[in-house]
Image (spheres, rainbow, N blue to C red):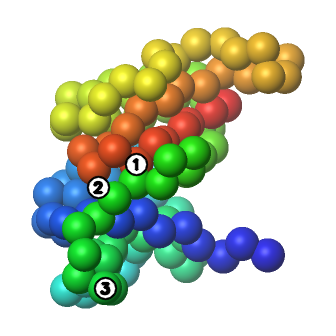
Amino acid sequence: MLIAVSVGTDDLESSMAFYDAVLATLGMTRSAHNVTEAGYSIPGTPPIFYINLPYNKAPATYGNGTQVSFAGPNRAAVDRFHATALKLGGTDEGPPGERDYQPGYYGAYCRDTYGNKLDVAH
């Protein structure tokens, strides 16, 4: 069973600023933080998403083919997530809209400032 997902960063402070704002659009907050990582969750639950400085001290890199997906409570949240990510320096990988993956699927894709691919869907 999956309990958490982590992505790397070389600048924890700037990544926390990015994810504090982007994940707030989904009702998530930073619920854990130390000098090497920060964790995010829905209030009252354990962290399920982390950003961290690489343990081996090598530069952080994104995974080719790796994507972290978040559930948006509605289409407006998907729109806000995507817009906030782009406003804070993320890059567009597919604007909000319906996809043909399954009936009613509405999603958006972007990358954070380190190239980690993010998906949000309702």
Which residue is at 70% across, 15% downward?
Answer: 99
Cα distance in 3D space between marks 1 and 2: 16 Å
Cα distance in 3D space between marks 3 and 2: 25 Å
Give the quarter of the image for residue 53: bottom left
Q: In the rendering, which numbered label is found on residue 56?
A: 3
- Labels 3 and 2: the sequence-earlier one: 2
Q: Which residue is mark 1?
A: 116
Q: Residues within 10 Å of mark 3 (few under 14, many from 20)?
A: few
Q: Is residue 114 visible?
A: yes
Horizontally, residue 90 falls left or right of residue 66, namely left
Q: Are marks 3 and 1 in contact (CB under 8 Å)?
A: no
Amino acid type at mark 1: Asn
- Labels 3 and 1: the sequence-earlier one: 3
Q: Which residue is mark 2?
A: 20
Is residue 104 depicted above or below 30 in this figure? above
Which residue is at 38% across, 38% downward?
Answer: 111
Q: Nearer the viewer, mark 1 or mark 2?
A: 1
Amino acid type at mark 3: Asn
Q: Position of residue 61 (x, y in %)?
A: 34, 59
Amino acid type at mark 2: Asp
